[in-house]
Amino acid sequence: GGEDVDPAEESARAMALFVQWYYHEEQENRRIAVEARINRVIAAGDVVVKKNLEKALAKRAKRNKAVLERLNKASSEMAKLVTPWEEERRKKVQRDVLANTYQEKEWTRNFQRRLVTGERRWADVEADITRTQSSVSSSGPQNSGGSGAALGGAGAASSHTPAPQASSSSSSSFPSPGQPPQPP
């Protein structure tokens, strides 16, 4: 009959007998001693695992702290480099703005002066033309030197001398380059 026994059934039966014997009242002291020994082994394993975990966490914290310190140092160095450069750029922009503002005002003043001078000169030219036309029309056909004589050109120098008032007015109206205009 030993050949018909299933090994799984035999194993299950042996296990059941062991559990029944192990949990019997007579084995209580033995059971307590085995459980204490198992708890000591597990506790020692827990201590090792906990210690290894704490070491890993400490290494990670140290590595994170070192990375953070490097980042702070790099940031501080960048700030030391950027701050003076930024200040220099800000001052240069302020200088340039002031210089450009001054230059714009100077250009505006120069344009205004030129405008006033140009308007005066134009008024003087119109007045000279009017005087010349009126003197030509009042003197009649004596001055037949053509349009050059009427306007005081080169041909008019020998035949007609302009009135002293007209020549002084035209010379004051057209100052030499670089000289400020004289008031009329």
Image (cartoon, grey):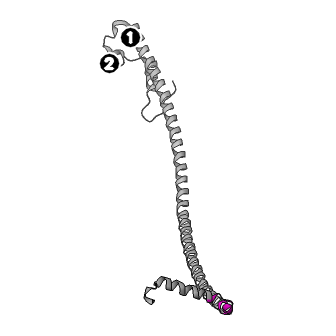
Query: Residue at the location (53% across, 60% down)?
Result: 82
SS label for mark 1: helix
Of 4 and 25, the residue lying toward us: 4
Tell me the crowding category of disc 1: few under 14, some 14 to 19, or many 20 or more residues within 10 angstroms, Cα based. some
Indicate the quadrant where residue 98 lies: top right
Q: Position of residue 117 (x, y in %)?
A: 48, 28
Classify residue 103 as left or right of residue 177: right
Residue 71 at least partly seen: yes
**Quarter placement of the N terminus:** bottom left
> Is 27 contained in the magenta span?
yes
Task: Name above or below for residue 153 compared with residue 16.
Answer: above
Q: Which residues are magenta?
A: 21-31
Residue that badge 1 annotates: 136
Task: Give the mark nearest the N terminus, 2 or 1.
Answer: 1
Question: Looking at numbered disc 1 in the image, what kind of residue is underneath it?
Answer: Val
Residue lying at 54% horizontally and 71% vertically, measured from the top left: 67
- Foreground disc of the pair 2, 1: 1
Query: Quadrant location of residue 148?
Result: top left
| Residue designated by label 2 | 158
Can residue 40 be seen here?
A: no
